[in-house]
Image: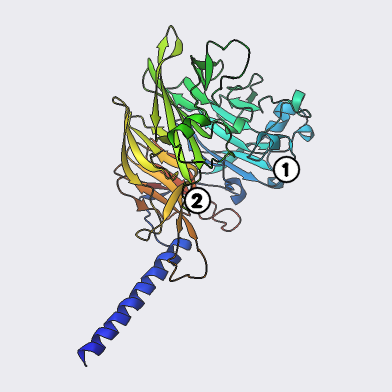
């Protein structure tokens, strides 16, 4: 065979091989083929798969030293599951007559709190000694389950309106219930739980330090510079602290607001003339709190302002700024003792494990793209570790975390990402194409490298047990797979 013909055939074979490999990468990513299944075990099972119905928020498995909980949510009435007489009707605990209960609330603006939605029910189950999740309570609408670290106190953050304001537009905090006997009895916290932090209870993301100390985060206050009134001597940081599991709480105050105005961002990039206004005067905001010991804590308030690229063609530019406040406990009260401002930094997520290691998702660029980074808690400096993993790798793509699905264990990290790949224009020349896919990854070296898990990337993760580095999952959602078993993978 002539050498030229051999080379031609080899070239064609290489092109065909490359095309097949490219199609395999795209197809396997979209269909979620592949992934590891380390140390697979069965956690438990449900008698009815509807009890493990997952949604985008407030559902899944929570493991404590006292018990293992499961929250599912359906667009159905509680009676469709025919609960037994010993199952607690939490609507009745609050209203007396469950028919008076307000419809559940959907995420979004506060105005949606007052709109009626399709009937939903949250089902709260607990794992028994026989490995069965037993239904212990149900409540209308969304409900997030939060526990104290020792598992003795269980809080249910619901969207139920308080009886006295159920038919008004008064922004009282929605109902929060507490159980101290593992779900047999529930008490409505009539004074609320960090009520100033958020009026919609299931929006709260409490942060425990030890068994009793707990923090909650709201929105920092802004001093009114144009007001004729005398400026206040202290401004709320939007962070609240309690030493008794939230029974009593107080705001953390600062001499000045931790927020900067849009003018600050514009001063950093005077070449940008077209600024976005959708996020308001303070831009996108994200607040985190971290308590290091009995005397020291920190607050990070990050802001992001978007502007059009000066050339009018390229992608929009993000201008980031983070204000960090150091707190000290004096005579039982936390006080802001100093603060520092870091330009070009946005902290999206901040996690700490029992060993004191701190990992975060941060953005130090101008495209709003997070990376995994570690915080040196002594020097308070960040060390980037890796980009977010992509199911399309090594193809070019960009990834984002699905919701808040980023977890930290004793020795591992777990993340659920959505990745986007843009086919080259010579392959898809008639328009800009975008292919997206979800996946779950874990890392055993703190984010420097990632392995993919054989778990569905959309609502696949049911929960994570940090103390044991175990992730919980099920075979599809309840309606497309009737396997009632719930499984786990050990990631160590």
The residue carrying mark 1 is: 117
> How many marks do you count on the picture?
2
Report x, y in % for residue 29. 44, 61
Report x, y in % for residue 366. 42, 43
x 57%, y 12%: residue: 231
| Dot label at residue 312 | 2
Q: Residues within 10 Å of mark 1 (few under 14, many from 20)?
A: some
At numbered mark 1, what does the secondary structure look like: helix, strand or loop?
Answer: loop
Give the answer, above or below, for where 301 lies relative to 50.
above
Front one among 478 and 399 = 399
Quarter residue 174 falls in: top right
Q: Is residue 234 visible?
A: yes
Give the answer, above or below, for where 342 lies relative to 80.
above
Front one among 95 and 205 = 205
168 vs 40, left or right, is right
Report x, y in % for residue 292. 36, 22
Quarter residue 108 falls in: top right
Compute the Cα span from label 1 to label 2.
41 Å
Front one among 457 and 328 = 328
Give the answer, above or below, for where 160 lies relative to 106.
above
Give the answer, above or below, for where 185 lies relative to 117.
above
Report x, y in % for residue 278. 59, 40
Mark toward the viewer: 1 or 2: 2
Front one among 490 and 376 = 376
| Dot label at residue 230 | none
Q: What residue occupies the far top of the structure in this picture?
A: 331
Counting residues from the start of the chain, the first of labels 1 and 2 encountered is 1
Colour option used: rainbow
Q: Quadrant of the N terminus?
A: bottom left
355 vs 79, left or right, is left
x 44%, y 41%: residue: 406
């Amino acid at each position: 065979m002539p050498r030229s013909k051999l080379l031609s055939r080899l070239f064609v074979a290489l092109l065909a091989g490359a095309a097949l490999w490219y199609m395999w990468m795209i197809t396997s990513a979209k269909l979620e083929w592949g992934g590891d299944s380390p140390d697979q075990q069965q956690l438990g099972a449900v008698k009815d798969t509807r009890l493990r119905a997952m949604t985008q928020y407030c559902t899944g498995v929570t493991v404590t030293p006292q018990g293992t909980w499961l929250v599912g949510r359906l667009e159905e009435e509680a009676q469709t599951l025919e609960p037994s007489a010993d199952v607690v009707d939490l609507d009745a605990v609050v209203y007396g007559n469950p028919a008076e209960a307000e419809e559940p609330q959907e995420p979004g603006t506060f105005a949606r709190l007052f709109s009626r939605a399709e009937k939903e029910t949250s089902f709260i189950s607990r794992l028994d000694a026989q490995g069965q999740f037993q239904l212990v309570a149900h409540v209308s609408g969304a409900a997030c389950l939060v526990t104290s670290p020792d598992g003795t106190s269980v809080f249910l953050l619901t969207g139920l309106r308080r009886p006295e304001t159920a038919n008004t537009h008064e922004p009282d905090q929605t109902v929060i219930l507490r159980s101290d006997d593992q779900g047999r009895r529930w008490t409505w916290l009539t004074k609320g739980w960090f009520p100033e932090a958020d009026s919609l209870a299931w929006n709260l993301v409490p942060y425990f330090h030890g068994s009793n100390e707990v923090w909650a985060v709201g929105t920092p206050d802004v001093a009114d510079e144009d007001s004729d009134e005398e400026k206040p001597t202290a401004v709320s940081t939007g962070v609240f602290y309690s030493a008794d599991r939230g029974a009593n709480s107080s705001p953390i105050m600062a001499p000045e607001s931790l927020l900067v105005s849009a003018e600050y961002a514009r001063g950093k990039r005077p070449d940008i003339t077209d600024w976005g206004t959708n996020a308001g005067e303070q831009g996108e905001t994200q607040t985190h709190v971290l308590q290091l010991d009995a005397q020291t804590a920190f607050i990070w308030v990050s802001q992001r302002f978007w502007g059009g690229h000066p050339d009018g063609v390229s992608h929009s530019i993000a201008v980031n700024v983070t204000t960090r406040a150091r707190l000290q406990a004096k005579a039982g009260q936390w006080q802001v003792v100093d603060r520092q401002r870091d330009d070009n930094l946005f902290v999206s997520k901040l996690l700490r494990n029992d060993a004191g290691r701190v990992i975060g998702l941060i953005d130090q660029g101008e495209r709003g793209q997070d990376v995994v980074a570690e915080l040196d808690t002594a020097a308070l400096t960040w060390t980037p570790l890796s980009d977010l993993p992509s199911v399309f790798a090594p193809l070019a793509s960009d990834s984002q975390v699905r919701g808040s699905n980023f977890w930290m264990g004793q020795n591992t990290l777990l993340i659920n990402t959505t990745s986007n790949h843009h086919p080259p224009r010579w392959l898809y020349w008639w328009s800009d194409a975008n292919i997206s896919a979800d996946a779950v990854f874990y890392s055993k070296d703190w984010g420097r490298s990632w392995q993919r898990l054989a778990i569905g990337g959309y609502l696949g993760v049911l929960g994570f047990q940090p103390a044991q580095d175990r992730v919980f999952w099920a075979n599809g959602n309840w309606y497309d797979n009737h396997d009632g078993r719930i499984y786990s993978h050990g990631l160590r």
